[in-house]
């Protein structure tokens, strides 16, 4: 940062200053990327060596080479956890997406209505505030009692997890609509409903997307917790079985797959968000 | 401002550390950390403490409690306990992974690792579909695709796998939902799943609820020996303490073996007061009917006779191999190590007692 | 007008909650107590649990266990995560060194660490504190880093032109400027650790509020599960409230942004 500002010392305009800083950032980013590569290689190497010299025992941590070979092996070998890696992944993904989609379908409109109509807000808000501080994970035992141990119970838990950020962000988004825009719409004779649809919702979209990203994250985290407590397939179940069989390699492959899929899903959502970006802010 | 923030945080950290350290206490005698489950094999050391047997012993016992063998094995990996008892499958896993020594038999629990259904289950229509296993209910078709609740990779799971094999099936033909015992019971009670895998004393609670037993380790011809064991490093560092600990443990085993009627009350009190289970007297009386207990000389015989404990452990290992839970390499080294059975402690105990008798 | 508005603001939540409890009561009359206990039964169970012991620890004791785990982990996450995150934002070389490792580990949910944490640290306190720590640590780093990256360069330049050294720029200008972002992170980190402690206690513990709801399930007592959930909710919101209070105490200039 210092480097950047040093070079820009004599540039008077702030806008220009920022442009140059941006350009510099990317130039120097490319120049310094080798540091990241080296650092990553060092990390993997250190991990491998720690295991090779048994500084940490083979039943506590396995070297990355073994993780990679197990990862490849898990595409064709269902042992010892009873299913292939992609089967576990599909089981988890489909559950997470069901809960997430339902949460978005219900949560976003609810948040929007709460933000636009004070009556809805007054009726729903207290209940929402009472339930919100209970983490979705705490619902697992009661969900098992109510809905069993199948898809419904897990989808319910994930729904709860994904629901809250959807509502909050849709609510906040629409509350932040520029009042001038609303007044202009009203002056031109738009009804309250029209203003809601044409002014309120579009201006809430960036916040809604932020909420959806948070929701997806919460859904994925909670799913893992639910699978640790009761499951017969899924990535959470896979790491739980790795735990039962004292197989750290299975646990680590499962963890990395969970992390990778989580990152992949947020990336996809970011891409979708970017497509909407052109018609974003009205202000 | 920042100082205040850091002061707050430091206070929080220090407070937490104090809270933790105040929980650890200093003891004069060495402490043997004993691990057990809410099961018959956990009663010995708990009762020894209650009955004051430990006053003369050269160690103090710290009792650690686990709902099933999975947690026990993990705690062993982190060296959190020294001596203890657990089911045959966790014992095998612990020996295979962490060199855990198998030094005795807490009891033979083939009958008390069992599978239960609700009274309306279609499994109850047929009995002894395979004439070699007359006590197993249901046909292979009945069992196929059933949802079975319970903790996987435990001794109850072994009883399940043995039952499935007796019917010509394997784990892959059913759907096993991995849950801890108590949670599985509650879910099963709420109408979830078709079959539940249990062990005593929870199976007596199942019986009291009107559920029906459809198989057990014994029904599937699997001999299931609960193991007494010791962490490898502890056995190497303190062999004398292991013998002393075993002395106390065996005193409990022999009390139950020789005087079952007098042992009902202590066991009941262990289950209800300590474990928080809701059991009645007549349930606990069954414990002594279903389980075989061995005294010291019988233990030595069983540990050394290749047709007894080694054969029983081989049965477990064969199953785990067939299920793909362990690899051929792991199996071979486990068999070559004679299943990590070490009768030396039991023998030393016999010598010690013989010397004391003189 | 204003009076009636204020009156509504008080009455509406009360009415809404009352209707909810009434509905709950009506539903519970028509289903078995094993499925949904009545609000009264839950209240009674709550009072009973306040006096009885659950597996040898009182209710307050269980809350204390959970809180101590969360606070230790949270404290560690702040002490370690804040400097790392701030320095990542300040020094590009440091960022380049740390970020590839951080980016690989970041998307793994803290709860997925439970099995490996148990293998590494055992079933006692260590693994539970570790899980909560992971949850809070990642959020702390991210927020401190983002806060630092978005510090207005003008502020730094101004400090520099007044002759501030590099260290002074960092401590006296950059850090206070990213306080809002840090505090947002602190709040999220705390609620994340609270969730993680529950998960860790539900997967294996003998004390803590997560254990209470699992014990309620083990004993087939839905009323105990619901009491546990209510307590979790109350403690969670008290924690958040306490943090807001501390924040007001430490950076009063930020009030209008909350």
Image (cartoon, rainbow, N blue to C red):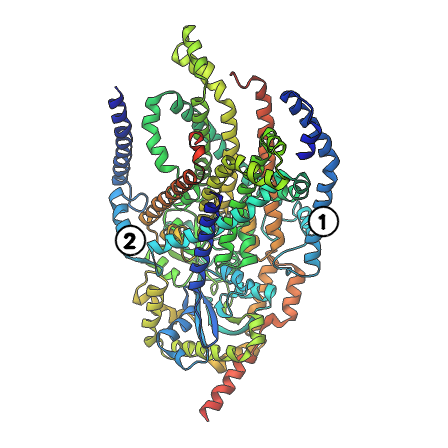
Query: For the view shown, which residue lies furthest in the front direction?
Result: C162
- Residue at 47% of width from left, 52% of height from top? B10
Q: Nearer the viewer, residue C222 or B124?
A: C222
Name the residue tied to disc 1.
A42
CA gap, disc 2 to disc 1? 54 Å
* Disc assigned to residue C250: none
Residue C14 drawn at (x, y percent): 26, 32
Label 2 sits on a secondary structure element that is helix
Q: Nearer the viewer, residue B131 or B236?
A: B236
- Mark 2 vs mark 1: same chain? no
Chain to which mark 2 belongs: C
Label 1 sits on a secondary structure element that is helix
Q: Residues within 10 Å of mark 2 (few under 14, many from 20)?
A: few
Residue A185 drawn at (x, y percent): 44, 10
Q: Is residue B199 visible?
A: yes
Residue B178 drawn at (x, y percent): 49, 51
> Of the residues tagged 2 and 1, which is closer to the observer?
1
Q: Is residue B175 visible?
A: no
Looking at the rendered structure, the number of numbered marks drawn on it comes to 2
Name the residue tied to disc 2.
C50
Tell me if residue B201 comes above or below residue B152 in the rendering.
below
> Does residue A41 appear left or right of residue B102 in this picture?
right
Q: Residues within 10 Å of mark 1 (few under 14, many from 20)?
A: some
Tell me if residue B321 comes above or below residue C88 in the rendering.
below
Tell me if residue A192 comes above or below residue C146 in the rendering.
above
Chain to which mark 1 belongs: A
Q: Nearer the viewer, residue B335 or B250?
A: B250
Q: Nearer the viewer, residue B49 or A151?
A: B49
> Does residue C238 appear left or right of residue B102 in this picture?
left
Q: Are marks 2 and 1 in contact (CB under 8 Å)?
A: no
Query: For the view shown, which residue lies furthest in the bottom direction?
Result: B358
Residue B336 drawn at (x, y percent): 66, 70
């Amino acid at each position: 940062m210092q480097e950047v500002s040093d070079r820009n010392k004599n540039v008077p305009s702030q806008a220009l200053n920022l442009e140059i800083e941006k350009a510099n950032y990317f130039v120097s980013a490319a120049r310094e990327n080798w540091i990241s590569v080296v650092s990553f290689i060092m990390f993997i190497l250190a991990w491998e060596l720690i295991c090779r010299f048994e500084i940490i025992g083979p039943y506590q941590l396995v070297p990355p080479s073994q993780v990679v070979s197990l990862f490849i092996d898990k595409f064709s070998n269902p042992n010892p956890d009873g299913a292939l890696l992609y089967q576990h992944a599909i089981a988890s993904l489909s559950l997470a997406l069901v809960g997430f989609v339902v949460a978005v379908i219900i949560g976003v409109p609810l948040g929007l209505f709460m933000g636009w109509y004070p009556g809805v807000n007054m009726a729903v808000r207290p209940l929402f505030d009472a339930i919100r501080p209970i983490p979705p994970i705490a619902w697992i035992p009661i969900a098992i009692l109510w809905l069993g141990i199948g898809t419904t119970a897990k989808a319910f838990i994930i729904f709860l997890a994904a629901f809250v950020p959807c509502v909050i962000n849709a609510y906040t988004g629409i509350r932040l609509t520029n009042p001038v825009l609303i007044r202009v719409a009203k002056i031109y004779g738009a009804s309250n409903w029209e203003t809601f649809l044409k002014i309120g919702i579009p201006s809430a979209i960036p916040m809604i997307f932020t909420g959806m990203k948070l929701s997806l994250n919460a859904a994925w985290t909670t799913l893992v917790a639910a699978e640790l407590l009761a499951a017969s397939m899924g990535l959470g179940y896979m790491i739980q079985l790795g735990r039962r069989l004292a197989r750290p390699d299975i646990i680590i492959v499962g963890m990395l797959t969970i992390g990778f899929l989580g990152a992949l899903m947020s990336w996809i959502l970011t891409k979708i968000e970017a497509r909407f970006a052109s018609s974003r802010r009205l202000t | 401002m920042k100082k205040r923030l850091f002061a707050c945080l430091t206070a929080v950290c220090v407070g937490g550390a104090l809270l933790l350290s105040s929980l650890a206490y200093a003891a004069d005698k060495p402490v043997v950390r004993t691990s057990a489950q809410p099961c018959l094999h956990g009663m010995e050391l708990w009762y020894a403490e209650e009955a004051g047997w430990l006053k003369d012993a050269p160690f103090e016992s710290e009792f650690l409690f686990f709902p099933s063998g999975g947690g026990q094995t993990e705690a062993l990996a982190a060296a959190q306990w020294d001596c203890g008892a657990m089911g045959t499958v966790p014992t095998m896993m612990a020996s295979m992974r962490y060199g855990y020594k198998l030094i005795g038999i807490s009891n033979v629990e083939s009958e008390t690792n069992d599978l239960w259904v609700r009274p309306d289950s279609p499994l109850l229509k047929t009995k002894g579909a395979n004439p070699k296993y007359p006590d197993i209910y249901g046909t292979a078709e009945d069992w196929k695709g059933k949802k079975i609740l319970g903790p996987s990779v435990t001794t109850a799971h072994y009883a399940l796998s043995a039952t499935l094999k007796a019917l010509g099936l394997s784990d892959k033909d059913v759907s096993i939902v991995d849950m801890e015992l108590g949670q599985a019971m509650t879910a099963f009670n709420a109408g979830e799943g078709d079959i539940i895998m249990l062990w005593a004393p929870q199976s007596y609670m199942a019986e009291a609820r009107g559920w029906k037993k459809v198989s057990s380790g014994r029904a599937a011809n699997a001999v299931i020996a609960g193991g007494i064991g010791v962490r490898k490093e502890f056995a190497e560092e303190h062999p004398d303490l292991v013998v002393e600990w075993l002395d106390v443990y065996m005193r409990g085993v022999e009390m139950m073996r020789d005087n079952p009627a007098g042992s009902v009350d202590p066991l009941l009190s262990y289950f209800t007061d300590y474990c928080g289970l809701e059991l009645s007297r007549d349930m606990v009386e069954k414990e002594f009917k279903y389980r075989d207990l061995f005294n010291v000389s019988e233990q030595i015989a069983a540990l050394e006779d290749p047709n007894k404990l080694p054969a029983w452990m081989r049965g477990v290992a064969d199953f785990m191999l067939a299920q793909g839970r362990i690899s051929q390499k792991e199996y071979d080294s486990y068999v070559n190590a004679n299943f990590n059975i070490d009768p030396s402690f039991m023998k030393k105990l016999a010598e010690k007692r013989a010397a004391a008798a003189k | 007008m204003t009076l009636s508005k204020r009156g509504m603001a008080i009455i509406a939540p009360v009415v809404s909650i009352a209707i909810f409890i009434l509905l709950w009561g009506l539903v519970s009359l028509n289903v078995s107590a094993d499925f949904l206990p009545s609000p009264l039964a839950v209240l009674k169970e709550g009072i009973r649990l306040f006096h009885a012991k659950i597996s040898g620890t009182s209710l307050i004791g269980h809350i204390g266990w959970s809180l101590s785990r969360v606070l230790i982990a949270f404290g560690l996450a702040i002490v370690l995560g804040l400097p790392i995150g701030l320095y990542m934002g300040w020094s590009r070389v440091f960022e380049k060194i740390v970020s590839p490792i951080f980016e690989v580990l970041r998307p793994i949910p803290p709860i997925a660490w439970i099995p490996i944490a148990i293998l590494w640290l055992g079933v006692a306190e260590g693994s539970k504190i570790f899980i909560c720590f992971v949850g809070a640590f990642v959020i702390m780093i991210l927020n401190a880093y983002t806060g630092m990256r978005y510090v207005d360069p003008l502020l730094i330049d101004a400090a520099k032109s007044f002759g501030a050294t590099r260290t002074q720029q960092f401590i006296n200008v950059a850090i206070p400027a990213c306080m809002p972002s840090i505090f947002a992170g602190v709040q999220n980190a705390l609620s994340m650790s609270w969730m993680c402690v529950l998960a860790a206690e539900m997967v294996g513990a003998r004390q803590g509020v997560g254990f209470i709801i699992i014990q309620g399930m083990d004993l087939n007592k839905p009323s105990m599960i619901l009491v546990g959930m209510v307590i979790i909710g109350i403690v969670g919101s008290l924690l958040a409230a306490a943090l807001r209070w501390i924040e007001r105490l430490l950076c009063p200039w930020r009030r209008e942004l909350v």
